[in-house]
Image (cartoon, coloured by chain):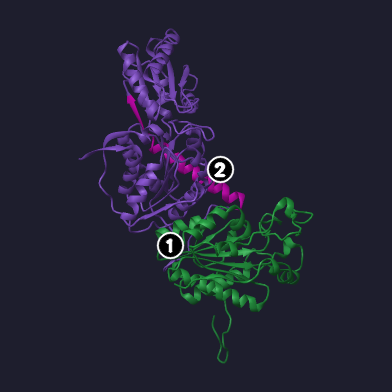
């Protein structure tokens, strides 16, 4: 982008982001999460050595929005695929981008064992408490009482179980070196989320091992609320169940 | 060349390493665990990747990842484990990345047992997961052949950007035989031009199996089918034994083909005009050769360690020109030469006056 005399460029599309429209719904925070990852890739200067692993879910098309090499995994298997890539390309940066159905339900074994092995990869985990791509079904992260198309009367914990807290869980794995939960519901939290994402990528570059950043995200379409209400929902309903913070941070 | 007394599973593992294998991902399951164990020792020694995965599902998806980087990669398993890998096989096929899969078959269905079987013929030859695709399937009958076909499998997988599989039963995996191993090939240093690994000085690459538009998906399917047609044209492999003057033909692969060879020899000693065709490539299947033999045959006998799976393909090749009989054992039982001989004799009697040779027909 060119600037005219007297103008100062303060905000532009990161180099690691493609100049295309996304398929995401209005008000969805995937766009913010993508941008944060792209900014971090730019700042660390790793675009040409990064390989992303897209999941199955709304972000299956993530590869359209990043200017780096990408593969697309089977549902839940991104950490296994990333393991295969990283083991044969140890000097590249490999990250997965996964939703909650992908990572916390069908792919639970793969994410747990990738963490246990201390795979030197970075995982970006989008927790929006619902299956977006298939049209709003109950996710492993759906809140108790929350209505979805497959829990039409609200998630009944007696028959459908409780939500899973992945950051707390993965922090228990000895191979994990950085596990943090952040939120994308306001600018302050977005800035904190970026810092966490940067640390997660830096951890990999330094060879520390497995890192994951969980991002509380909105899904206004399937939550059936406005984008503004969706951000409010994260703040008032999700935060009490999914407290923010660093669950593990080892820098060596 | 030095001959080693070597177990089938270890021979395959070492042959793969010598073919330039860069990564192995697997999960323990009898009767193939020696492949995993050999890799666990040798791969780190050579500075190559080895991971014991948490499941066969994870193992095949690790293979998928390394294959996308353009590295020579393999996994091995046995029947129930291969069932779990079907998901990954379909994705790998649809992404057109090469890899080698070894299936050392055991008795089934279900948990079954760890005894030798050939009941995965349908699973490997006909399917490899959902969608229209078939991997290359190579079926060795000796440890030496297992070694040679392992090398070939890597070359074919690379050549066609496809999945090449070795299909053998627990007998061959566990059996020790004298065999020669090939020399160590160097590991490939330049990645293929489709592999991912960082967009340095080039446009980004994406490897995926998704084509949301039906028109695109159909076009991709046509491309896959064209590739399979080329494989059918170029890569059929089989062995023939005592075909001269034969009017009856036994067809068997792997261990049952080897047992059948003994039975054919015994039958010849009794004056029965019988020969053996042992398919080595199960996909592509030696259909044309079988079809040509059927023109003048009195009958066919298919021998398998299952309920009759390759039987279907033989029947298709024969096209109703003459009777096709079947003799098989199941559940981990291996047919003995005497049993096969009895089946040959029965076919001989049943078809004695059924058909005159082509030359004698009016």
- Residue at 43%, 13% (x, y): give it: B347
Chain depicted in purple:
B
* Res B296 seen here: no
Among numbered discs 2 and 1, the one appearing first in the sequence: 2
Chain depicted in green:
A
- Is B332 placed above or below B39 here? above
Disc 1 on helix, strand or loop? loop
Residue B205, given in percent of the width and then of the height, sits at 48, 61
Asked whether A173 falls inside the magenta stretch, the response is no
Q: Residue furthest top?
A: B353
- Is A116 placed above or below B146 here? below
Q: Quadrant of the C terminus of chain A?
A: bottom left
Residue A126, given in percent of the width and then of the height, sits at 62, 64
- Residue at 50%, 77% (x, y): give it: A43
Residue B125, given in percent of the width and then of the height, sits at 47, 36
Q: Quadrant of the N terminus of chain A?
A: bottom right
User: Chain ID for label 1?
Assistant: B
Quickly name the residue at label 2: B131
Horizontally, is A181 left or right of B336 in the view?
right
Foreground: A25 or B86? B86
Disc 2 on helix, strand or loop? loop
Quickly name the residue at label 1: B197
Horizontally, is B361 left or right of B19 in the view?
right
Do residues under tags 2 and 1 come within 8 Å of each other at their CB atoms?
no
* Res A228 seen here: yes
- Is B265 placed above or below B27 here? above
Q: Which residues are magenta?
A: B212-240
- Which labelled disc corresponds to residue B152? none
* Number of numbered labels in the structure image: 2
């Amino acid at each position: 982008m060119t600037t005219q005399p007297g103008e100062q460029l303060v905000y532009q599309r990161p180099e690691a982001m493609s100049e295309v429209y996304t398929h995401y719904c209005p008000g969805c925070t995937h766009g913010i999460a993508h941008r944060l990852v792209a900014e971090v890739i730019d700042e660390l200067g790793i675009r040409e050595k990064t390989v992303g692993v897209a999941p199955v879910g709304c972000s299956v098309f993530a590869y359209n929005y990043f200017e780096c090499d990408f593969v697309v995994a089977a549902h839940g298997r991104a950490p296994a695929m990333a393991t295969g890539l990283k083991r044969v390309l140890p000097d590249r940066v490999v990250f997965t981008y996964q939703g909650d159905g992908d990572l916390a339900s069908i792919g639970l074994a793969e994410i747990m064992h990738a963490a246990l092995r201390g795979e030197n990869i970075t995982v970006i985990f989008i927790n929006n408490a619902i299956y977006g791509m298939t049209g709003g079904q109950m996710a492993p992260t759906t809140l108790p009482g929350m209505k979805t198309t497959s829990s039409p009367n609200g998630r009944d914990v007696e028959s459908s179980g409780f939500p899973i807290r992945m950051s707390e869980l993965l922090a228990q794995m000895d191979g994990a070196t950085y596990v943090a939960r952040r939120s994308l519901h306001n600018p302050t939290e977005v800035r904190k989320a970026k810092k966490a994402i940067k640390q997660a990528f830096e951890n990999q570059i330094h060879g520390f091992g497995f890192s994951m950043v969980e991002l509380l995200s909105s899904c206004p379409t399937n939550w059936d609320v406005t984008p503004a209400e969706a951000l409010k929902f994260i703040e008032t309903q999700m935060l009490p169940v999914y407290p923010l913070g660093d669950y593990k941070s080892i820098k060596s | 060349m030095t001959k080693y007394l070597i177990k089938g599973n270890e021979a395959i593992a070492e042959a793969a390493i010598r073919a330039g294998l860069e990564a192995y991902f697997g999960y323990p399951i009898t009767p193939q665990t020696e492949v995993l164990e050999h890799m666990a020792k040798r791969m780190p020694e050579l500075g190559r990747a080895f991971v014991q995965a948490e499941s066969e599902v994870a193992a095949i998806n690790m293979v998928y990842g390394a294959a996308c980087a353009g590295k020579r990669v393999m996994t091995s398993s046995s029947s129930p484990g291969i069932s779990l890998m079907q998901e990954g096989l379909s994705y790998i096929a649809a992404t057109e990345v090469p890899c080698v899969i070894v299936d050392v078959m055991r008795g089934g269905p279900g948990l079954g047992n760890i005894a030798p079987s050939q009941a995965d013929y349908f699973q490997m030859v006909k399917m490899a997961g959902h969608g229209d695709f078939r991997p290359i399937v190579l079926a060795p009958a000796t440890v030496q052949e297992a070694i040679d076909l392992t090398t070939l499998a890597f070359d074919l997988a690379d050549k066609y950007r496809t999945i090449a599989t070795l299909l053998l039963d627990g007998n061959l995996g566990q059996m020790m035989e004298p065999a020669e191993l090939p020399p160590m090939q160097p590991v490939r240093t330049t990645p293929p031009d489709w592999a991912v690994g960082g967009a340095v000085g080039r446009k980004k690459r994406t490897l995926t199996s998704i084509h949301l538009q039906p028109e695109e998906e159909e076009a991709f399917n046509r491309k896959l089918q064209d590739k399979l047609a080329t494989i059918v044209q170029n890569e059929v492999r089989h062995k023939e034994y005592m075909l001269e003057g034969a009017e009856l033909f036994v067809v068997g692969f792997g261990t049952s083909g080897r047992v059948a060879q003994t039975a054919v020899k015994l039958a010849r000693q009794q004056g029965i005009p019988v020969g053996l065709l042992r398919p080595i490539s199960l996909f592509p299947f030696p259909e044309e050769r079988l079809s040509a033999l059927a023109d003048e045959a009195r009958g066919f006998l298919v021998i398998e360690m299952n309920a009759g799976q390759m039987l279907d393909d033989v029947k298709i090749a024969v096209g109703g020109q003459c009777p096709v009989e079947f003799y098989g054992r199941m559940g981990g039982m291996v047919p003995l030469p005497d049993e096969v001989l009895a089946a040959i004799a029965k076919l001989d009697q049943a078809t004695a006056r059924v058909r005159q040779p082509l030359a004698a027909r009016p």
